[in-house]
Image: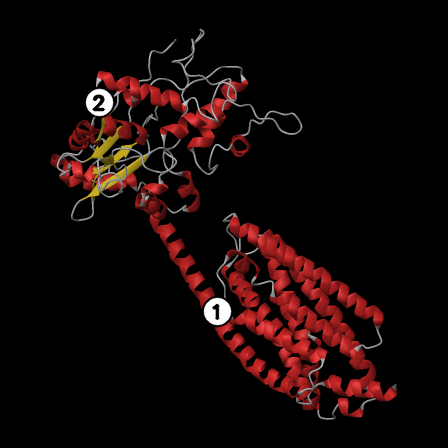
Amino acid sequence: MSLARHDPPGFVEDLLPENRPGWSTIISAFMHTRRVNPTITPHFYDATREIEQDPIVGASVTWLGFPRQVALDFPNDRRRWTVADGERQAQDEYLEWSIKRNAENKITKIVFCNEGPEYFEYLAQKQPDTLVKLYQDLNPGLDIKKADLFENGVYNPRNKWNSSTDTGSIMHLIQRNNTLSAQVDLGGRATILRVRDDGQLIIDRDELSRCSDFGNDRRNSDPTIGAAINAFAREGHKLTIENPVGLYIDSVDWAPVHPPPGHDDDDPQEFWKWTRGRTGTFVRGEFEVPPKKADTLLLINTLIFQSFSLMKTQEQDDLYALGVNTTINVINTIITSTGYGAMVLMMFVAMHYLRKKQRTIPIIALATCCMAIYARKAQYLAYMVVAASQPGLIYPVGDALVVWRAWVLLPREKFYKILLSMLMLANLGISIADIVVDYIQIQSELQGITNSMDWIMCIGLLLINVVAMLLIGWKLWTHQRNVESFVARSSGHQIQKIMILLIESGALIGIAQVMNLVLNIVLAYNSNLTTGFQYTYHVFTALAPVTTAWYPLMVIILINTGHSPAIHTTVHFIDSV
């Protein structure tokens, strides 16, 4: 065989000679699994079990160690580093670190590590005392005891000296994706060539990552590693992971690092030292200010937070954005409190009138719709499906009531009844589709305050309202010439009648829906929005469901208080029949 055995990561010398073969066996086991084996991954091999053919060519794959997911989600420097420094679980690029600070909260030491947990677990089984001494030697000044590392005789990888980001005592990786077994599994499966349905080889990094399930394509590491290995495999090469199998710190980019004012002669590199591994296979490094340089603590802060001098503008932007969001929340609170308060009052009045009516099927149906609106607005369920559907459920009920009112006023107009019913059913389908899209959006953890289905649903809502409003208006206008009491001679009373007519025909709701439609279309196709637009958008999106819920309640109250212009129209129609 080409390789006698797999050496420990970084060629470290911790293991006794009798324990080295055991570690080699573990690495070989990683290379022969259900997902990685000569049958499934013929381009991948274990050098301890196969004779390599000349020429043997080495290649390295490098990536940025800072977590890409954090960089994408938090473009602000301070926020980004705060999140990355906050917990080891966020450090998912096979590089983890821990920071030590002094009493003044100044950074005095940062320890970086990319050594997998499997080696330390094996060392703990075979040579527990060696493991304890290793912890102590690499972390001078800390009172590390064996009891801190073992629980009931079993090594705890997440012990108190290796689980935090604020002790400066990191020993090995603990993030759930940062393991040697995951590295070997990725290396083996990445040699499988992937083909599209049209027969074309997949070579795009992100597409290849999704197809081959290399892991989260929002990471720097796995997609980059997988794409590089797959490219070698497409050239017809057989591949393995170079001995010793491990993940290594390739280099540190010092170019953007500059000493702080007053320390121009200091070289940042003098504060760095490798503490584990050898050249080309380093697995641990420390950045620390020596005691004699205690007056240059700021240097480390400048290194880690490289853009301190540029943060002022970004912080102002963050503060401004916070102010905008606060204002929007206040607007929504005012509209919601006032609108829903009025709805509750109208609800009780409307139900009082309905209770006096004879319990016919239409009255029961109307009361049920009103109760459905009230119940929907009275509770807020936090489950995903309900959270996605809660803005859209209220609109189909409102549509049904608008159509019902038009039916009452148009008893003989079958064509218009069918038209309104078809529009209502079509919009119901759009509402359901919008709920599905919103649910998928939530499940995918996508961000944004709207999507393309919202403005389509707005068109459906508006279309139903406009048709119903025109039909009701036409019906009332046709009969008003023959009903003397419909139009009073007082101009003030005339204006009052017009306003009531606008309410009952749904025109006022239609105006709100027109604005909502326009704003949603603008929002769907324009990401650069002014603060004024954001305020206006949130006002009308808050008003839309409120006014929809108001409509049936206002109609019931108008009819039963004798203020509905349609009452006289209906009476006139019956008399004429």
The kind of secondary structure element at disc 1 is: helix
Going by the numbered disc 2, the residue's amino acid type is: Asp
Which label belongs to residue 14?
Answer: 2
Sequence order check, earlier mark of 2 and 1: 2
**In the depicted structure, whether residue 487 falls above or below residue 423:** below
Crowding at mark 2 (Cα within 10 Å: few <14, some 14-19, many 20+): some
Residue 244 screen position, x and y as percent: 33, 19
Residue 145 screen position, x and y as percent: 15, 37
**Residue at the spot of label 1:** 331
Q: Tell me how far mark 2 sits from mark 1, CA to CA.
A: 64 Å
Quarter of the view holding residue 404: bottom right
Q: Is residue 411 visible?
A: yes
Quarter of the view holding residue 89: top left
Q: Going by the picture, which residue comes out furthest to the front? A: 152
Going by the numbered disc 1, the residue's amino acid type is: Ile
Left or right: 36 with respect to 570?
left
**In the depicted structure, whether residue 557 falls above or below residue 133:** below
